[in-house]
């Protein structure tokens, strides 16, 4: 379904809602709130009402007392789990939904219809709060609308992570993929193995800028989430209809764990938590004890994260150490495997089968295609359409996150003014035009594309301020790509003009359309920009051996 032009104009007229609702019909007049305006919700949809009170109260001073005759959140039959209808007349506001998430998204849209000052955390003066008369019918295009945040390369303090959960919910995104472990840091407390955070949660220093410049900051970096923190984060997210998908990246990207517990690695020499970016050669060994160790880790992960999906990584695993390791070579011989790629699939199957046996859904990066996808794994396809297509064609569910289109650590524009310019240019309009479904899929294969996620990898994003700059406004464009049928970039820009006022009110330090403010630049940290042709060339080389 393509939104008709009249509806686009209406979306802009009706307060510039982002992501664009499916259908908007503007009415006449406005609904005016006052201190007596009541709010009533069906008990099944009470969360949306509570959120409206909690969120609007401090900014507007509106108490929204319980009762009929003002704002009503009504349970209705027949809408999808995230679908809602919002009807505003001068006399009333009605949100209709069949499920709590739909009611919540109706409430989110209602907040956007108010003046952007409704996005502040306190009152800024006397104001009459009104919303325009409008009828909105809205539902998402994809069920999986995610954002990966890499808290391993740079730790994101807990309160900043909570703030990001609110930002995701504001944009009707519903999955937070938390990349919790990597070579450069282990960020999750594991009770059974305390050294994972005692040793693994911090590194001596970090690179300053891209690898080729050889610069380091000489400054320790670290942090981790206690299990209490994680419970809080997961519950805070659930209250906002965001599911947290934890990632424990195996068997590569594990140097921080090996630094903490050297017996997990392939070498006799001790390792430090890695202080360089890029793909490291230190991977887990394939001993039974190592499998048991990470099974214990997953047990604690399952206790903490109640969602269906758990990501076990599988990306970028150099086979150098296994090809030289006597025990790894013995495993390959013993199990009659073709090579180290199949050894990786064999190893990963312990973890994916373990999750499946406990009623969870394993998520793994698309490199798992190389040694054969373990049964039941949902594939996070980051290396382009070919991998997404192969995974869907072999009967696996797929979440797409193609790096040239959705990796938001890639630079936003040409020029050396962008803070730490890496990758090719991933512009706002390219993110807005992103279509998660690769061309050429059959109807059945298309049905396996659950949705998409943007990725905030943080090698070069060392602070919440820079995270804001890299995420916004592109994440708003991405939200539209996964929520809306709308593909009118001009319409998006018109609505973005309003939406930026909301981001200002929230204190989000987004990239201005004209480029970074002077204080958003990083002349101290030179980058390594690539052309799109270079990036496409890398992709072709990585996936050359994969056959349809
Ligand atoms: C990835 O970008 N290594 C998943």
Image (cartoon, helix red, strand yellow):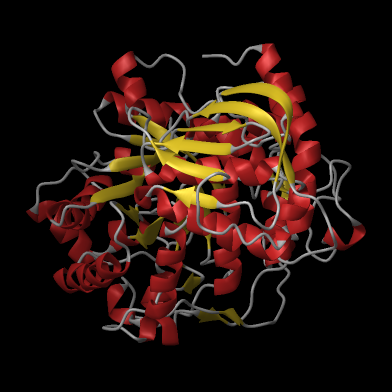
The x and y percentages for residue 211 are: 66, 60
Residue 65 located left or right of residue 293: right
Nearer the observer, 350 or 49: 49
Residue 517 located left or right of residue 293: right
The x and y percentages for residue 123 are: 77, 65
Q: Is residue 236 above or below residue 390?
A: below
Nearer the observer, 432 or 53: 53
Q: Residue at the location (43% across, 34% down)?
A: 451
Q: Residue at the location (22% across, 52% down)?
A: 360
The x and y percentages for residue 120 are: 73, 60
Indicate the quadrant containing the C terminus: top left, top right, bottom left or bottom right.
Answer: top left
Quarter of image, res 204:
bottom right
Residue 128 located left or right of residue 160: right
Residue 523 located left or right of residue 371: right
Q: Is residue 212 above or below residue 403?
A: below
Quarter of image, res 543:
top left
The x and y percentages for residue 295 are: 20, 68
Quarter of image, res 215:
bottom right
- Residue 459 visible from this viewpoint: no
């Amino acid at each position: 379904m393509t939104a008709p032009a009249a509806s686009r104009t209406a979306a802009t007229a009706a307060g510039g809602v982002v992501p664009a609702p499916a259908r908007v019909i503007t009415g006449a007049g406005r609904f005016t709130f006052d201190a007596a305006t009541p709010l009533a919700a069906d008990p099944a949809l009470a969360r949306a009402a509570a959120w409206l009170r909690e969120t609007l109260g401090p900014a507007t001073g509106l108490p929204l007392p319980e009762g009929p005759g003002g704002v009503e959140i009504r349970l209705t039959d027949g809408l999808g789990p995230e679908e809602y209808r919002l009807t505003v007349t001068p006399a009333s506001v009605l949100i209709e939904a069949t499920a709590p998430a739909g009611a919540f998204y109706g409430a989110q849209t209602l907040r956007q219809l108010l003046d952007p000052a409704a996005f502040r955390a306190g009152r800024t003066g006397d104001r009459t709060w009104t919303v325009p008369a409008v009828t909105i019918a809205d539902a998402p295009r994809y069920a999986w609308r995610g954002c990966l945040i890499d808290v391993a390369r740079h730790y994101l303090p807990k309160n900043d992570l909570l703030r990001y959960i609110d930002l995701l919910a504001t944009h009707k995104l519903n999955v937070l993929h938390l990349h919790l472990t990597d070579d450069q840091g282990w960020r999750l407390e594991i009770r059974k193995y305390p050294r994972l955070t005692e040793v693994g949660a911090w590194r001596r220093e970090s690179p300053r800028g891209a690898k080729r410049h050889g610069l380091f900051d000489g400054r320790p970096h670290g942090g981790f989430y206690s299990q209490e923190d994680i419970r809080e984060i997961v519950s805070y997210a659930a209250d906002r209809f965001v599911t947290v998908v934890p990632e424990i990246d195996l068997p590569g990207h594990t140097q921080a764990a090996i630094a903490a517990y050297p017996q997990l690695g392939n070498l006799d020499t001790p390792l430090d938590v890695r202080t360089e970016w890029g793909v490291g050669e230190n991977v887990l060994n394939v001993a039974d004890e190592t499998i048991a160790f990470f099974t214990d880790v997953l047990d604690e992960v399952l206790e903490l994260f109640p969602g269906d999906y758990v990501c076990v990584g599988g990306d970028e695993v150099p086979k150098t150490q296994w090809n030289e390791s006597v025990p790894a070579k013995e495993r390959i011989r013993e199990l009659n495997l073709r090579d180290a790629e199949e050894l990786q699939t064999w190893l990963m199957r312990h973890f994916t089968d373990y999750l499946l046996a406990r009623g969870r859904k394993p998520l793994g990066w698309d490199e798992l295609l190389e040694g054969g996808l373990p049964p039941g794994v949902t594939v996070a396809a980051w290396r382009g359409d070919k991998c997404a297509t192969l995974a869907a064609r072999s009967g696996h569910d797929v979440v797409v996150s193609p790096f040239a289109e959705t990796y938001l650590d890639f630079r936003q524009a040409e020029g050396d003014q962008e803070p730490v310019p890496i990758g090719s240019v991933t512009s706002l309009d390219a993110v807005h035009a992103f279509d998660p479904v690769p061309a050429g899929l059959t109807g059945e294969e298309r049905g396996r594309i659950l949705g998409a996620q943007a990725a905030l990898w943080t090698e070069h994003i060392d602070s919440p301020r820079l995270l804001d700059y890299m995420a916004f406004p592109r994440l708003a464009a991405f939200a539209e790509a996964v929520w809306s049928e709308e593909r009118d970039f001009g319409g998006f820009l018109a609505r973005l003009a309003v939406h930026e006022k909301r981001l200002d009110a929230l204190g989000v330090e987004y990239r201005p359309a004209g480029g970074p403010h002077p204080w958003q630049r990083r002349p101290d940290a030179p980058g390594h920009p690539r052309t799109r042709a270079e990036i496409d060339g890398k992709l072709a080389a990585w996936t050359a051996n994969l056959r349809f």
